[in-house]
Amino acid sequence: MMTINVAIKCPDGIVMGADSLVSLVASDGGSISSIIPYYNKLFPIGISQNTLDNFAAGAMLNGAGSIGGRTIEDIISEFGEEYSKTNPVNNYSLQQLTTDLGNKVQKIIDTTIAGKNPLLEIIIGGYSKGERAAGKRYGEIYSLFWEQQPYKLRVLYTNDVEFGTHYGGQPQMLDRFRYGIDDWILANMLKKRKDLFNQTRDYIIDKLKENGVSIPSTVTIGMPTSMKQFDIFNLFSDYELGSTPGQTMKNIKEGMVEKVETMERFLSLQTAINYCTFLMSCSYAQNNFAYAIPTVGSEMRVASITRHDGFKYRKIWEIQTPGPPFR
């Protein structure tokens, strides 16, 4: 299930948004066989109609929509019901709640589909409360990430005065807005790095020969294996090499010298909602106006989570009886 998820942490709260289009993949594992609209990917953690009786937290997902015949929404709903019996909604750690949710989902994976871990991300945003909040006043954002292996907990925004935006699903258009580049462009540049090096090397050798420098035919100059010895990215990014290729790619994007400097630390809740809606619209535009089978679309859902009001939908479709022909 491809999607777009956006989570923003600002001083007034957490804003989360997701689309509601589901793509069903054929049995061959590659092609899309069907598209279903109005699938909920954003929901509170808790089952009460009174938001104050739920945890001040929300969850949204991308990737697999179900495990062993059960929807992820149902699994999270059951978790919220069980968890509140032993963890009061006014005294809990959001990081521990996220870890415990990951353990529950992993157990269901192990018992129902024989440990065949899916491609799945569950993003959790909200607040810790009471003594277990350990003095935290502002929101937190975490990600539970399965990539055909047991889940990893990714701590995204937990420092109290650290604010920013995380998105999952299809990041290409959002990356282009924020950084002016995306992972696909960077990957293509890496593919062409060798050709560029060979052109540069041959040019230098030819110029040396024109100036009377004798270069034995046995001399070979191969492309450096170290990125920093022939760095094509430092033309536009002030970055440091990461511990993994993925981290390096992230550092290149965040180090872009002409990236858009967003100001989440100054956003009001309403402005954060507007920003969330805009970012999702970038992905909607790509899927609606480009030559591609849309995998992002249908109605947007946007919610806010604040310390005092908890989880509240700010943009949500209302189920209606359609008139003919199914309007």
Image: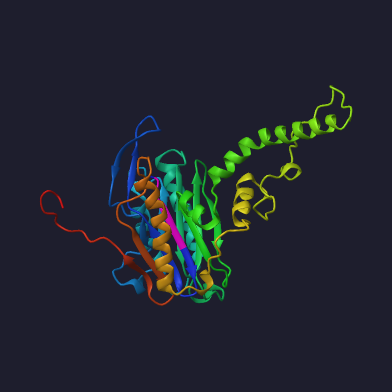
Q: What is the image's colouring?
A: rainbow
Q: Nearer the viewer, residue 315 or 112?
A: 315
Q: Nearer the viewer, residue 305 or 194?
A: 194
Lateral position of residue 56 relative to residue 209, left or right? left
**Residue 177 point in image, percent of width and height:** 49, 56
**Residue 236 point in image, percent of width and height:** 64, 52
Q: Nearer the viewer, residue 154 or 246?
A: 246
Lateral position of residue 159 relative to residue 122, left or right? right
For the N terminus, give its image quadrant: top left
**Is 5 covered by the magenta stretch?**
yes
**Residue 167 point in image, percent of width and height:** 47, 56
Question: Residue shown at 65%/46% (left/top)?
Answer: 244
* Visible residue check, residue 87: no
**187 up-or-down from 75: above or below:** above
**22 up-or-down from 33: above or below:** below
Residue 318, image quadrant: bottom left
Q: How many marks?
A: 0
Chief secondary structure of the magenta portion: strand
Question: Residue shown at 12%/48% (left/top)?
Answer: 325
Question: Residue shown at 71%/33% (left/top)?
Answer: 199
**Is 247 covered by the magenta stretch?**
no
* Visible residue check, residue 202: yes
Residue 136, image quadrant: bottom right
| Residues drawn in magenta | 2-7
Question: Residue shown at 66%/47% (left/top)?
Answer: 233
Lateral position of residue 239 relative to residue 4, left or right? right
Q: Farthest residue toward the left?
A: 324
**Residue 200 point in image, percent of width and height:** 73, 36
Q: Farthest residue toward the top?
A: 217
Residue 208, image quadrant: top right
Lateral position of residue 17 relative to residue 157, left or right? left
